[in-house]
Amino acid sequence: MKRQPVARPPDPAEQAIRLALETLDIEAAAVMGLKRHVGLSFARVVALMLEVTGRVVVMGMGKSGHIGRKIAATLASTGTPAMFVNTGEASHGDLGMITAVDLVLAISNSGETDELTSILPVLKRLGAPLVAMTGNPESTLARHADVFLNCGVDKEACPLNLAPTASTTAQLALGDALAVALLDARGFKAEDFARSHPGGALGRKLLTHVSDVMRVGDAVPQVGPDASFSELMREMSAKGLGAAAIVDQQSHVLGVFTDGDLRRLIEQGMDLRGMSAQQVMHRQPRTISAEALAVEVAELMEHHSITSVLVLDADARLIGALNTNDLMRAKVI
């Protein structure tokens, strides 16, 4: 008898890569499949969320709860007041967080989660609009909702078709679609986003003003026009800005002298020892107001290839100064 060849066990690396690619294909198909469900019901949900005077209360249990928490956070950070209430905790007191002026967005793939269906009568009596996000149009949740959003998928990415994978990806994508539609309808801008993210990079760029980072008082290097060159250099060295302003008695700026100006004059072979600050200064320096955004002064420096800028008040008097190091410390650049 001919011996049958022994089947080789699958290579672990190849198996992992194959399953990863299959997972991505299934979840991508699940998200694309949502497009056939986005229609008038989606637009109605957006309209309801725009009209609500309270908050959008996102509810969910288990994996849908994790997705719901993220959806609530995305809504809140893009201009729609929102919060998350765990469905399991709702029947033990957390229902008190929900009022008649709120809107409830309940998420459940099956639409039959016991913890959710048990509180549906209470939610209905409360009078808050109920939006269902579920993959089962015939479910208890879908039937009791004022508006139903279908987030159904053909199959899970899990090889057993059991663990929530593609279904939670679809829920997350549909939540993001709601947030983006609401953001646009509200005219939400980058400045609004920054106000809710003051600790982030965008927040620092859009909320930090020149007045927040500039040097003031004795920290601002400045001399009079008749100051000697040695006095000018001592002031520059002591203050560490890389420049010094030349001002009149009323603090109006006449010019500026920078490390770059010093280098260029030395390269020209000039004898600077007998010169005054007025003789070596660069007239009409780049300036900015204290009310300007710090990101604006960063752009000014980059555009003109300079490393320091003087800050003037409305009467063109010197009130501060800053350089690239100051912007870096403030994490603006």
Image (cartoon, rainbow, N blue to C red):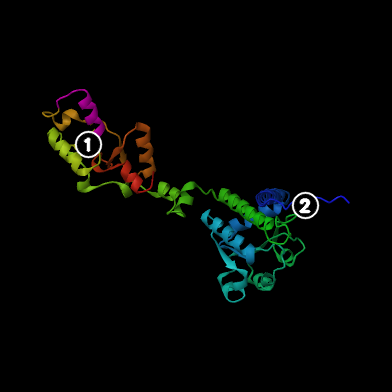
Q: Which residue is mark 2?
A: 7
Mark 1 or 2, nearer chain start: 2
Question: Picture quarter containing residue 235?
Answer: top left
Taking the view exactly as shown, the residue that stands out farthest to the left is 274
Q: Is residue 264 left or right of residue 14?
A: left
Please say whether residue 158 is visible from this viewpoint: yes
Query: In the image, is residue 262 part of the stretch drawn in magenta?
Result: yes
Determine whether the residue tagged by mark 1 lies in a helix, strand or loop: strand
Return the x and y of residue 45 as percentages of the image width and height: 65, 56
Which three-letter amino acid code belongs to the residue tagged 1?
A: Val
Residue 170 at x, y = what percent?
67, 54
Farthest residue, direction right = 1
**Residue 38 in sight in this render:** no
Residue 85 placement (x, y as % from top left): 58, 67
User: Is residue 124 a member of the stretch shown in magenta?
Assistant: no
Instruction: Report helix, strand or loop for mark 2.
Output: loop
How far is disc 1 from disc 2 in space, using C-alphas?
A: 86 Å
Q: Say what amino acid the circle numbered 2 marks.
A: Ala
Residue in the foreground of this view, choosing between 253 and 14? 14
- The magenta segment is 259-271
